[in-house]
Each structure stands twice: as structure tokens, then as C-alpha cells.
Image: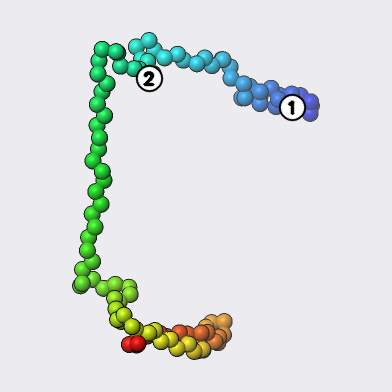
Amino acid sequence: MMRIGAALLVVSASALVLPATPSVAESARSGVKLAQATPPGEPAPRRVRRPPTRLHVYPTYEGVPEVYPRYFPGPNAVRECNATYVQEYRPSGTVIVPRMSCYWRPG
């Protein structure tokens, strides 16, 4: 019984894999030719050239808030930074983390 089941399985698998009719490649129709060249008496067709893509650049307006404020401290400014450790209370427990605060001062 096992041999008959295995034989049926092999026959059904081969029927699915092998096509019933052989496939034949189609040839191009006689009216359509690929890569046609222009006849020697006619001029070559002109290529249409698209204009380059234009990018529009819009200025930033003063009334719109930014993420970082603009600030020019001057040509001789010095940046002063203070680093400390502070406690943060988290669900896992209290931890100590570094904090840094910086500002510009005239040089």
C-alpha cells in the first residue's frame, strides 16, 4: 500500500512540474521590427530636450520659531561650560547622571 501511495505521489508531482504542451517562442510580427533605423533618404528625428528641473528655495521668516535660537555671540566670544552630577528619580531607582550647561561670554 505504501508503494502505491508513493508512486501516485511521484506521478502527480511530475504532472504538476512538467507542462502538458511544449511552449514555443513567438516570433515578431512582420509589420513590427525592433530597432528600426531611419531610411537613408530621411533625416534623423529630432530629440526633444526637457528644460532642467527648477528648485524653489524659500527664505525662512522671522515670525516662525525654530528649534534652536539664532545667536551670534561675536568674533571673540568664549564658551563657558559647567558640568555637574544630579540625581534623577526613575522607576528603577534613583540614579546620578551628568548634566552640562553652557553659555557664551565675551572674550
* x, y percent for residue 40: 29, 13
Q: Mark 1 to mark 2: distance in Å?
A: 55 Å
Q: Position of residue 29 (x, y in %)?
A: 39, 12
Q: Name the residue at 24% across, 26% down.
A: 46
Q: Report the residue marked by disc 1.
A: 5
The figure's colour scheme reads rainbow
For mark 1, give the secondary structure: helix
Asked whether residue 89 appears in the rendered view, the answer is no
Give the vertical position of 43 relative to 64 (above or below): above
Q: In the rendering, at what x and y percent does residue 12 appear?
A: 66, 24
What amino acid type should be assigned to the residue bearing mark 1?
Gly
Q: Quadrant of residue 13?
A: top right
The tag on residue 93 is none
> Eyeballing the image, is 52 above or below 66?
above
Front residue of this view, candidates 6 and 17: 17
| Amino acid at pointer 2 | Ala
The quarter holding residue 2 reads: top right
Task: Please indicate whether residue 23 sits to the left or right of residue 53 in the image.
Answer: right
Give the mark, 1 or 2, whose residue is nearer the N terminus.
1
Residue that mark 2 sits on: 35
| Residue drawn at x 26%, y 29% as measured from the top left | 47
Residue 23 percent coordinates (x, y)? 54, 16
